[in-house]
Image: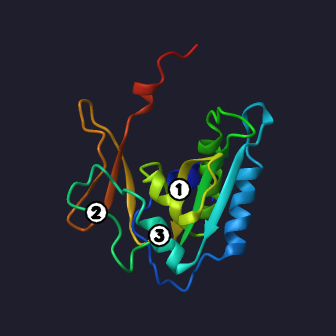
Amino acid sequence: MDIFELVKANRSCRRFDQFSDHKIGNDTLKKLVDLGRCSASAANFQPLKYMISTDGKKNEEIFSCLAWAAYIKDWDGPEEGEKPSAYIVIMGDNTITKNFRCDHGIAAQSILLGAREMGFAGCMLAAINHKKLRNFLNIESHLEILLVIALGTPKEEVRLEDLKPGGNIKYWRDEKNIHHVPKRGLGEIILASW
């Protein structure tokens, strides 16, 4: 897959084949975190720390701290059988710097691109019950929870489509449960070209 295909294939996946034979193990999670580690870091501070889980009990605890797909009002998140099989929690270490800038976004995108290339899919989540997650995972106070990445074998189809003028940017699901993601066209987002 070339980079353009990979980026387009790397959509937020919210339904997974929880019991797939194509499982994510801790070694795979470590390889994915290594992609985050090798990614750019503002001033090269490298303040990000990670917790990884493929454990069923820990995964349930993490899952209970997350909010899924705010635009889809009649859906509370993946059901049993569609839940992620792995998680990466990304934290910023306040003893290194107080400003994590966009490091966690860059690292998360690298991780998700790597996962997609391996045949997995994921979702970057920032709607987190921080207090509950901190308690469940015994996260020390100097670590700021920034993002959680849910990972697994994809069970849903996600389609990009052009946003029509005056159209709605909210993603949606059709009667076949295909997830549609409207995207603004290049003509709308490139303001100048010299």
Decide which of 194, 145 is in the foreground and name it: 145
Q: Secondary structure at mark 3?
A: helix
Question: Mark 2 vs mark 3: which is more N-terminal?
Answer: 3
Pointer 2 residue: 76
Compared across the picture, whether 153 is left or right of 105 comes to left
Q: Secondary structure at mark 2?
A: loop
Q: Amino acid at mark 3?
A: Glu
Decide which of 143, 172 is in the foreground and name it: 143
Q: Amino acid at mark 1?
A: Val
Residue 83 position within the rendered picture, expressed as x and y whole percent measured from the top left: 42, 73
Looking at the image, is 75 positioned above or below residue 168?
A: below
Decide which of 86, 143 is in the foreground and name it: 143
Q: Secondary structure at mark 1?
A: strand
Which disc is residue 61 wearing? 3
Residue 71 position within the rendered picture, expressed as x and y whole percent measured from the top left: 28, 49
Question: Mark 1 vs mark 3: which is more N-terminal?
Answer: 3
Image quadrant for the C terminus? top right
> Which image quadrant is residue 50 in?
bottom right
Compared across the picture, whether 22 is left or right of 72 comes to right
Q: Badges 1 and 3: C-beta atoms under 8 Å apart?
A: no
Residue 112 position within the rendered picture, expressed as x and y whole percent measured from the top left: 59, 56
What's the residue at 51%, 51% (across, down)?
A: 8
**C-alpha distance separating marks 1 and 3:** 12 Å
Looking at the image, is 126 positioned above or below residue 166?
A: below
Looking at the image, is 6 positioned above or below residue 63?
A: above
What's the residue at 44%, 26% (across, down)?
A: 189
Q: Amino acid at mark 2?
A: Asp
Q: Nearer the viewer, mark 1 or mark 3?
A: 3
Pointer 1 residue: 148
